[in-house]
Image (cartoon, grey):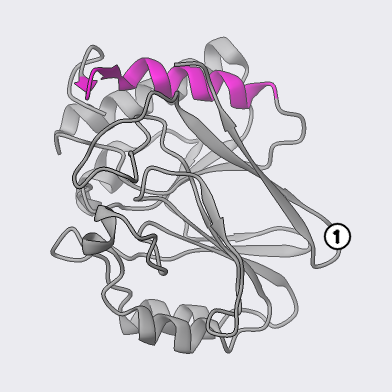
Amino acid sequence: MFAQTDGEHHGVLVYQNLLNVLNALSVIDDLNCIVFTGDLTQDHSIESYQLFQQAFSYAIDNFDLECDLYWLAGNHDELELLQLHLTHDRISAAKNLELEHWQLILVNSKSDTPAGFVNNQELSRIEGLSQNKNSLVFMHHHPIDVNYFIDKHGLLNKTEFWQVANQCKDIKGIFHGHIHQGMTIDKSSEYSIPVHACPATSIQFDPNSATVSALRQGPGYRLINLFNNDKYTTELFYLDK
């Protein structure tokens, strides 16, 4: 988001994109919650956060969007501004969501640089997840390299993160933002948990470019379906550009 509703990111009207995605989400049956995986602002302005909240409020009033919204801080975000200006009673700063059969933990990976870092306190939160429930972890930065330019701003302490995550048998999936792409990396001998990247509501990055370049692809979101056992499914959706 930018400070103005007509702010463009690589020629894309991001405010309108956000409204379009919220409109698409509003028609999904039994939607428990929405998680924004970071980078709510592009220009670091107070007004951009206010416009984000304005878009969400508009979706509630005009699209009958009924679920709550949760957020993570991305590398572009300022945590204090998020907490100060996202004050709608349907926007929650909570970082643990308890559902009947599942728990969702929102892990802070923001550091002092564009790259990510999960500190010891957050690693301890992952270690302390209830062993009685299936778990999903959400974070901003990607914990596995995706082999394009965004990797230079990836998770700095990937080894420490996976040392903890691999020991948590109840974590069934990890979801992240940051890379402006929707993709899945299945578990392997090195990574015991599938990792799912979430697309952006702004622009999708071209993975073949050496720097930021937008694909001719519309805004997207990832839908997650949770079941009463330890299974989930997830699907990507993109709107017309």
Could you say which quadrant of the image residue 112 lies in? bottom left
Residue drawn at the location 45% of the way across and 18% of the way down: 19
Above or below, 229 against 227 in this view is below
Depth order, front residue of 224/63: 224
Q: Which residue lies furthest to the front in this view?
A: 208
Taking 2 as reference, is 202 left or right?
right
Q: Which residue lies furthest to the right in this view?
A: 228
Above or below, 205 against 232 in this view is above
Disc 1: CA contacts within 10 A as few (<14), some (14-19) or many (>=20) = few
Above or below, 118 against 84 in this view is below
The spot of residue 214 in percent (x, y) is 30, 31
Residue position marked by numbered label 1 in the rendering:
228
Residue range highlighted in magenta: 8-27
Secondary structure category for the residue under label 1: loop
The C terminus appears in which quarter of the rendering?
Answer: top left
- In reply to whether residue 19 is colored magenta, the answer given is yes
The spot of residue 84 in percent (x, y) is 25, 43
Above or below, 3 against 86 in this view is above
Could you say which quadrant of the image residue 236 lies in? top right
The spot of residue 111 in percent (x, y) is 20, 66
Depth order, front residue of 220/205: 205
Q: What residue type is labelled 1?
A: Asn
